[in-house]
Amino acid sequence: MAFGLERAELRTWKKKVRHGEIAFLTHYWLDDRFPTCDTVTKVGCVDLDKLETWGKQYGLKKQWIHKRNKYPHFDLFGDIQKRILTEEKQWLHINKFNL
């Protein structure tokens, strides 16, 4: 279940993904499979080669790309989420969600 996300943020993320940019979207998230995580960051890009190359630098496997819709993305949470957001200097996401 996702929450803490404004419609404009989602629209902006989708537009960037469709235009082949590496785009970040963080929101609150609850999933019983991951009881210690309450946020997720979706890192998307319609250019799968670009997304795979981006993920590889952080040890993310191409098999982890969610491709079931027109917005392919990695889901980041936990320590990996914080590490990658920090390395990518995504301070807005880090500060807004107290990561």
Image (cartoon, rainbow, N blue to C red):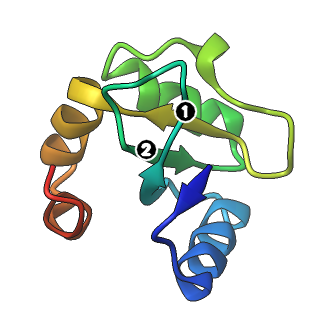
Q: Earlier in the sequence, mark 1 or mark 2?
A: 1
Give me the residue at 41% from left, 57% from top.
Answer: 26
Above-or-below relation of 55 to 22: above
Camera-side residue of 72 and 56: 72
Could you say whether the residue bearing mark 2 is in a helix, strand or loop?
strand
Could you say whether the residue bearing mark 1 is in a helix, strand or loop?
loop
Give me the residue at 18% from left, 58% from top.
Answer: 94
Badge 2: how crowded within 10 Å, few (<14), some, or many (20+)? many
Camera-side residue of 23 and 48: 23
Badge 1: how crowded within 10 Å, few (<14), some, or many (20+)? few
Give me the residue at 64% from left, 58% from top.
Answer: 20
Corner quadrant of residue 64: top right
The residue type indicated by label 1 comes to: Asp
Disc ID at residue 40: 2
Camera-side residue of 93 and 53: 93
Asked whether, in this view, residue 1 is left or right of residue 58, the answer is right
